[in-house]
Image (spheres, helix red, strand yellow):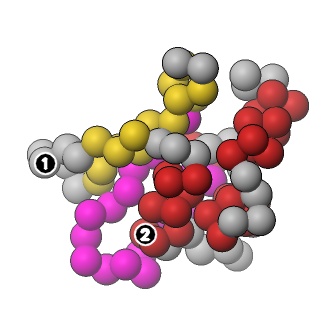
């Protein structure tokens, strides 16, 4: 199983050009991904110090399986490829 760590979740947010909003009253920051001015995905990123804690919610919230989400964060997949996948699924 492909575990999504905090570092990988941050890498995914950066790759998708997400805007990250800090929410002091919540244990997660919120990463919001926009395409052509519309919010298309959002996911939480834990602020805790345990960097190896899983962010298993991220793949489903960006409409990918765990393996493809990991590829997105590790660079083999681009933002444009992700957008193409969403278009293929009828989500854009």
Q: How many discs mark residues in the rendered view?
A: 2
Q: Quadrant of the N terminus?
A: bottom right
Q: Residues within 10 Å of mark 2 (few under 14, many from 20)?
A: many
Disc 1 marks which residue? 24
Sequence-wise, the earlier of marks 1 and 2 is: 2
Whether residue 66 is visible, yes or no, is: no
- Residue 30 image offset from top left, x and y in percent: 35, 44
* Left or right relative to 4: residue 22: left
- Residue 92 image offset from top left, x and y in percent: 73, 22
Is residue 33 in the magenta section? no
Q: Point out the stretch of residues depicted in magenta.
A: 41-59
C-alpha span from label 1 to label 2: 18 Å
Q: Residue at x 51, y 36 (%)?
A: 33
User: Is 24 situated above or below 48?
Assistant: above
Of residues 63 and 75, the one nearer the viewer is: 75
Disc 2 marks which residue? 6
Is residue 47 in the magenta section? yes
Q: Residue furthest top?
A: 37
User: Is 50 situated above or below 71?
Assistant: below
């Amino acid at each position: 199983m492909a575990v999504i760590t905090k570092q990988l979740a941050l890498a995914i947010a950066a790759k998708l050009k997400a805007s990250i909003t800090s929410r002091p009253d919540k244990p997660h920051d919120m990463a919001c991904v926009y395409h052509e001015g519309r919010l298309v995905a959002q996911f939480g990123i834990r602020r805790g110090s345990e960097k190896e804690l899983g962010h298993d919610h991220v793949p489903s919230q960006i409409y990918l399986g765990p393996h493809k989400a990991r590829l997105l964060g590790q660079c083999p997949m681009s933002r444009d490829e992700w957008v193409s996948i969403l278009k293929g699924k009828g989500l854009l």
